[in-house]
Amino acid sequence: MSLATPTSTSTSARPGARLLAWYALLGAGVLVGIASFAYQWQTGLTVTGLTNAATWGLYIVVFMFLVGISAGGLIVVAGSELVDSHRFEPLSRLAVIVSGTAVLGAAISIIPDLGRPQRAWAMMVSPQLMSPLVWDMAVISVYLTIAAIDLWILTRPTPMPRTLRRMAIVTLPVAVLVHSVTAWIFGFLVARPFWNTAILAPLFISSALVSGTALVLVVTYVTARTTAWRPPSTIYADLARLLVWFVAVDLFLLATELITAYTSQTAYHLAPLEMLFTGRLAPLFWSQLVLGVAVPLVVYATPALRRRTPLVVAAAVLSILGVFAKRVNILMPGMYDLQIALDPGIPLGRAGQGFGIDTLYVPTVVEYGVMLGLFAFLAMLITLGVRRWVAPAAATTERP
Amino acid sequence: MPDDVLGALLAGAEPDELATDTHRRSAIEALPPASRDWGRIDARSEEPRWGMLVDAERCIGCWSCAVICRSENDVPVGMWWNRILTDGDGLDTPSVDEHGQLSMEWLPLACQHCDDAPCEKVCPTAATFTDEEGIVGVDPDRCIGCRYCMAACPYGVRVFNWGPGEHAPGVDEGMVAPRPVGTVEKCTLCVHRLAEDQVPSCVVSCPAQARIFGDLNAEDSRITQLLRDRGGEQLLGSKGTEPKVRYLPPRRRRSL
């Protein structure tokens, strides 16, 4: 692989060595992940912090998060195609690489959550078609295929605008479905009033648009800083303008859900809200609103601020973290909220653990290790993809 | 004629064999059917649909049913298929109302064997199923351990095999095979006992006779009669899950 493009001397004296160090770091991360997963495989999910009271945790948060991240690229590309906007065309390849990697990561992230991953094929061989989990598997597979086809089209020597446009017509509805079905996994459960709301699907779509677009922005910036590839200088402000709308809609949907639940003043609505407003999730919830929503929104919406690229990139990083926090704040109140909350509660599942009513879930080192490995693997795929299909292409078409 | 009439009854003797005088005979016939055939299923229709009635007024919160369930079904340490919740101020303290009146009641809780089971609908591999006699079961061979059923169950009665099960000495000789690591399990209504015409072990072990088990389709079963006479509430009825386990609420407040 040719890495060192000596056209730009300002960024780095020895890009080759830096890149090697980056790959070594990611490789180490992947090894940690594999070792953690192997350990969990040997001993069972007992090495996680999960219990019968909080049966889903970090793995499912990451699953929701990665499904969301996958929106950005494909929707930005497909959306621009359909409205004949060429503003984001220079980002097409990069965006599809980010999206495809994220959706692949989502598919992988569900595997360590299974008690018996070796039997997961049963879901494909003899699926129970009423289960939203089966629908999600199907729609994620379609989405992954679309990302692969899009990437193939975009990397042909001759541009294929009409094919790309036809793909966009398929991509958008599937993208909407991916996030909706992922939301319905939670939203259809009568046992969890906090999740059992029709707004969950739109909310997942808006969060997906925020985090996905923000990640495309960050990867664009990093690529421009570390390679010879140069996107149009206005691209950050353009993405920021898009993000104003995405963040605003996301905030509106969250607010309307929380206000509706709060004004109902019924106990089963209030219990999870109290957890968010003043309870154990309050620090994360208020950080999400202030640092993950309000601060980035000000940066995106203020013309003077959004022209300062490093500020916009920092805001995008905050947006991504904010959406991650939001996933936690959606999953955990639903998990903690028992419908029959009488003593002694639920048997937590391991010898010596006893029972619990609202047992705190804290991920273990093993869970963090597995997820570190997954994120390192995805970062590696994005780096390889960008180096292969974005940065070399720029070497010939670089603007002065 | 044995002196231990109750012991003979428990062993399955017919009341007729025990009664030698009219006095004793009438005393035995005065026993409710469930006592006469203690431990045996009292009536069975052509197409049985099994259900359970829990009389909360009779429950004394002793946990006998919960303990025998674990030994009967080989349930590992840390897990319970059946447990007794306390409606009071904590596990062993009564609550006090504004007039100083104490109250403490119990809610025995296990799988509700719903007619419209949310766990079954979400299972991606059909590992959770309802059999032809209405029992909601889990096939450990099909279970992939995604725990979606646990998120879907409003009653919180499913438990997961997080790691290799630990067993207290003498509690690993149950009547059913242990379930593999990474699968979900729960109450089966002692389906293995039903085949031998025996009621579930929690029913037979209840010293207060607070549990009535039987065929909801049999006209003359005690559970059908009691449901007809006294009604029977479904837990979290508003969720629309239609449980086949019903509860008789206490008719009067216990004075403590």
Image (tube, coloured by chain):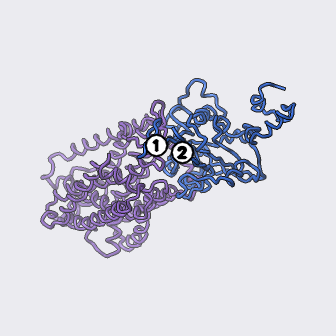
Chain colours: A purple, B blue
Q: Nearer the viewer, residue A128 or A29?
A: A128
* Place of residue A335 in the rendered image (x, y in percent of width and height, measured from the top left): 42, 48
| Residue occupying the far front of the picture | B99
Q: How many marks?
A: 2
Q: Quadrant of residue B253?
A: top right
> Horizontal placement of A212 versus A303: left or right?
right
User: With respect to residue B220, does A298 lie above or below?
Assistant: below
Q: Chain of mark 1?
A: B
Q: Residues within 10 Å of mark 1 (few under 14, many from 20)?
A: few
Q: Which residue is mark 1?
A: B101
> Horizontal placement of B190 versus A110: left or right?
right
Q: Quadrant of residue A74?
A: bottom left
Q: Which residue is mark 2?
A: B253
* Place of residue A361 in the rendered image (x, y in percent of width and height, measured from the top left): 38, 41
Q: Nearer the viewer, residue A7 or A18?
A: A18
- Residue A136 shows up from this direction: yes
> Which residue does the image show at 14% across and 61% down from the upper left?
A308
Element at label 1: loop
Disc 1 and disc 2 in contact, CB within 8 angstroms: yes
Element at label 2: loop
* Place of residue A362 in the rendered image (x, y in percent of width and height, measured from the top left): 36, 40
- Residue A105 shows up from this direction: no
- Tell me the kind of residue under disc 2: Arg
Q: Nearer the viewer, residue A346 or A45?
A: A346
* Place of residue A123 in the rendered image (x, y in percent of width and height, measured from the top left): 55, 51
> Which residue does the image show at 35% across and 60% down from the upper left?
A262
- Tell me the kind of residue under disc 1: Gln
